[in-house]
Amino acid sequence: MKIHSLIQVHIPRLISRSFGTLGTQKPGQNYLHRTKHIQWNTSSRIEPDYELCDSHSPNYLWIGCSDARIPAHEGTGQKTGNIFVHRNLGNLVLNTDANFMSVLQYAVEYLNIPHIIICGHYDCNAVHAAVDAKDHNNPLENWLCNIRNVYYENKTELNAIPDEKMRYRRLVELNVVAQCVELFKTNTIQRRRIKTYRDDSFPYTQPRIHALVYQPEDGLLKHLKINFKEYLRDRGEIYNLYHPAEAKAKLSQEPPSKSLKRKLSQ
């Protein structure tokens, strides 16, 4: 499925799930110790897709926020098994996060996923907390500082927006863009893109990276149209780990194909 058809899907505001509901809490009761008030639905189940029993070949890696209001495959109209999901506060891409980097490597090198989505959302509590001038204590404060750095890098644009709500919304978008750029810096992404770039069997360089923002007020996904070449042009000298010609020599001892030679000469 093409990415433009994936993002033009309405996400219901309320997604009904069968995992369970909370009972009515009486004064003085503590749910941490009174689990009998949680009524788990054990009589119904999610219908299994037997075609998925022996295979796992998702087309998308979804990197989204941990916010419980933001769905992944339900919101994109994709079937179970087509989206590999990773979530964290603020949908951040950190090369010091072993959890995230393991997911990224597995998705790209073992599942061969051709598309990666960074999806933020408006009214993001992580973004609001990052802008607050207060210490949230570690490790949360260390984590939020990464969003605060995005604000600093774009403070001229953001401070010029008089409406506070619109300023937060723009920061959400800029944070998504920043995380997409961080993806391009990783050796996992660079190595895969070089490999697929020089292999004629791939129709395009993979993985392709897409910047999306979920809009809770109408349940729609907004596709941020970004020219990543502009963002990466000035950073390439520092962050590029492979030059196409050098990468060919590193990844294979075979001579470049004719199509690769044409690409390198362009």
Image (spheres, helix red, strand yellow):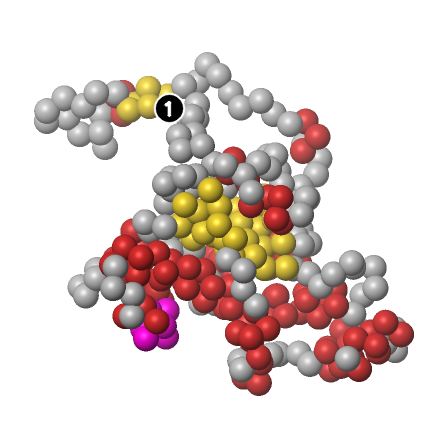
Q: Is residue 130 visible?
A: no
Name the residue beneath numbered marker 1.
Answer: 20
Please say whether residue 61 is one of the residues in the magenta stretch.
Answer: no
Q: Residues within 10 Å of mark 1 (few under 14, many from 20)?
A: few
Instruction: Please name the residue shown 47% across and 56% down the image.
Output: 99
Specify the quadrant of the image occupied by residue 258: bottom right
For badge 1, the amino acid type reads Gly
> Where 215 falls versus 93 (above or below)?
above
Residue 174 relative to residue 203: left or right: left
Q: Looking at the picture, how far across and down is residue 121, in whole percent?
A: 40, 50
Q: Nearer the viewer, residue 172 or 113?
A: 172
Q: Secondary structure at mark 1?
A: strand
Q: Looking at the picture, how far across and down is residue 73, in whole percent?
A: 54, 39
Main SS of residues in magenta: helix
The residue segment tinted magenta is 150-156
Specify the quadrant of the image occupied by residue 242: bottom right
Q: Looking at the picture, how far across and down is residue 78, in whole percent?
A: 60, 37
Q: Looking at the picture, how far across and down is residue 135, in whole percent?
A: 19, 64
